[in-house]
Image (spheres, rainbow, N blue to C red):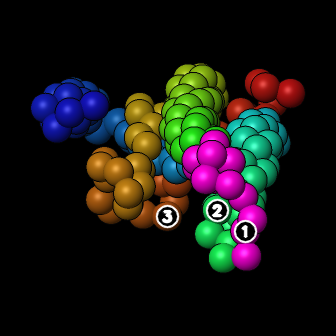
């Protein structure tokens, strides 16, 4: 969401707060990352991505080992390989190196896509849980705090406004 979208949302909240003057206004904040890390379903999804990544890493590690063995065989001063055999080994090494680099790029893309798909799917589910908490608790709005690595939406809030735990519980209830 761009800066303009956030300003529009905050402006709409200000108008709503002004419109409800005299009535108590409840606004909550959550940490979506904490919901993922603390909820049973979120932990399982993150573990799934981690396992997927580890499986790919094992393949990459094996490819690296094979390449290192070929490289050592090519640079062995005691080698008795003929010039033709040496050229074939060098071609084999080059072919394996190119395949390794392509596989590494493909795996990185796959892992990144899997992670983004998981984040997208679970962001929707977290939003549903937050909406349920908001309706049950009479909250006018629940905002995501954001994170230091991304754009922070909420720069300050009192600890009492944090409803992350309520959303974690609701998220687990809805997704178990």
Extreme residue toward the right, this view: 176
Mark 3 residue crowding within 10 angstroms, few (<14) / some (14–19) / many (20+):
few
| Above/below status of 11 relative to 67 | above
Check contact, mark 2 vs mark 1: CB within 8 A: yes
Instruction: Residue at 16%, 38% (x, y): give it.
Output: 3
| Above/below status of 44 relative to 130 | below
Question: Does label 1 or label 3 sit earlier along the sequence?
Answer: 1
Disc marking residue 79 = 1
**3D distance between C-alphas at marks 2 and 1:** 8 Å
What residue does disc 2 label? 74
| 79 magenta-colored | yes
Secondary structure at badge 1 equals loop
Secondary structure at badge 2 equals helix
Quadrant of the image containing the C terminus = top right
Q: Decide whether the magenta segment is chiefly helix, strand or loop.
A: helix
Bounds of the magenta segment: 78-90
> Of the residues tagged 1 and 3, which is closer to the observer?
1
Quadrant of the image containing the N terminus = top left
Front position in the image: 124 or 102: 102
Residue 93, visible in the rendered structure? no
Q: Quadrant of residue 143?
A: top left
């Amino acid at each position: 969401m761009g800066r303009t979208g956030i300003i529009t949302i905050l402006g709409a909240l200000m108008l709503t707060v002004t419109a409800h003057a005299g009535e108590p206004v409840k606004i909550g904040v959550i940490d979506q990352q904490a919901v993922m890390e603390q909820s049973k379903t979120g932990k399982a999804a993150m573990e799934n991505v981690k396992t997927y990544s580890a499986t790919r890493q094992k393949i990459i590690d094996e490819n690296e080992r094979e390449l290192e063995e070929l490289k050592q065989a090519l640079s062995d001063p005691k080698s008795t390989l003929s010039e033709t055999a040496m050229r074939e080994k060098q071609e084999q090494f080059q072919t394996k190196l190119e395949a390794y680099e392509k596989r590494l790029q493909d795996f990185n893309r796959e892992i990144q896509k899997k992670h983004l798909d998981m984040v997208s799917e679970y962001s929707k589910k977290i939003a549903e849980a937050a909406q349920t908490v908001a309706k049950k608790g009479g909250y006018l709005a629940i905002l995501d705090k954001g994170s230091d690595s991304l754009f922070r939406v909420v720069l300050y809030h009192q600890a009492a406004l944090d409803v992350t735990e309520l959303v974690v519980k609701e998220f687990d209830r809805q997704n178990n």
